[in-house]
Amino acid sequence: MREFMAITKALSDPNRVRMLLALRRGELCVCQITELFGFAPSTVSQHLAILRRAGLIESRKSERWVYYRLADKSAPVAVREALDWVHKSLANTDETAADAKKAKKILKPDLATICRRQKC
Amino acid sequence: MREFMAITKALSDPNRVRMLLALRRGELCVCQITELFGFAPSTVSQHLAILRRAGLIESRKSERWVYYRLADKSAPVAVREALDWVHKSLANTDETAADAKKAKKILKPDLATICRRQKC
DNA sequence: TCTTCATTTCGGAAAACGCCGAAATGAATG
DNA sequence: CATTCATTTCGGCGTTTTCCGAAATGAAGA
């Protein structure tokens, strides 16, 4: 019950759900999600922590950045079914499409910025 | 998105989830649920209203009482999948078993009370 | 018609939540 | 070492949620 409620509480905020949908395209670092949603980094970090504690996403640290991705096949059944349910229910909505469109814009220049910082 | 968030918000409270699980055994009236959970009638009514607005349960008025039941096959896909997910994730937990046990106790005397009122 | 009674609605109090900016963390760089 | 910088944690503010008791509703019974 505790695990299940952690999932439903994580899904009860629309911005967290949008973040899950954005992560379908692949892993994103905190700064990319911050740019995508227009929130303060601390806000995004907190949302991601709630999703991670619920088991819905996982994180990986690489160089300067922390990348978040959707939980994989090895996640508990309740988590996998929750992610499937979110995806099936919302993948084809206008709001998801709008976020995906914006993600394309954001992600290209951001990669360039990362490259510049790394002097590659 | 609005409909989906109505469902996730409805599921984000553990007492509402418990009510959904209790309704698996069949329809219950407000006073039975009140007895089962130990809340004020106004509190139970409000929880049920939230579940109903999310489409997860339906209501039926009969004589003095309003009976609530789980949404049926004709409900939207997102609702059916949510109910399946709740059921699959929590049907076999201790908490659900405890509620079911208490429901057996509550429901028998309560039926008797109803009978007495109806003088049958 | 007047009462009764299950349920709902309303108003308010306490707790939880979502957001931010400031400070802390901690790993990589110079 | 000291600095930089992405991220996290902390403190606080305004909003939302959850609970209750009191009042309103509305259908059934006297």
Image (spheres, coloured by chain):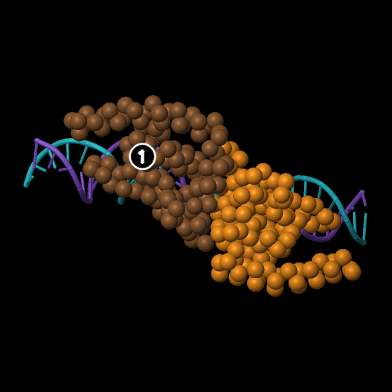
Chain colours: A brown, B orange, C purple, D cyan
| Chain hosting mark 1 | A
> Is the N terminus of chain B in the top left, top right, bottom left or bottom right quadrant?
top right
Residue A101: x percent and y percent? 45, 28
The residue located at (55%, 35%) in the rendering is: A92
Q: Amino acid at mark 1?
A: Leu
Residue D3: x percent and y percent? 12, 37
> Is the C terminus of chain B in the top left, top right, bottom left or bottom right quadrant?
bottom right
Q: Residues within 10 Å of mark 1 (few under 14, many from 20)?
A: many
Residue A106: x percent and y percent? 37, 29
Instruction: Decide if residue A61 is in sight here.
Output: yes
The residue located at (47%, 40%) in the rendering is: A21
Asked if residue A19 is positioned above or below residue A4 in the image, the reply reads: above
The residue located at (39%, 40%) in the rendering is: A26
Residue A94: x percent and y percent? 54, 30
Instruction: Decide if residue A15 is in sight here.
Output: no
On screen, residue A82 versus residue B97, left or right, reads: left
Where on the picture, by quarter, is residue C28? top left
On screen, residue B48 versus residue A83, left or right, reads: right
Q: Nearer the viewer, residue A92 or B24?
A: A92
On screen, residue B95 versus residue D2, left or right, reads: right
**Image mark count:** 1
Q: Kindly identify which residue carries mark 1.
A: A28
Q: Nearer the viewer, residue B75 or B9?
A: B75
Seen as rendered, the residue at the extreme front is A73
Asked if residue B2 is positioned above or below residue B82 in the image, the reply reads: above
Q: Secondary structure at mark 1?
A: strand
Q: Nearer the viewer, residue B64 or A104?
A: A104
The residue located at (36%, 39%) in the rendering is: A28
Where on the picture, by quarter, is residue B67? bottom right
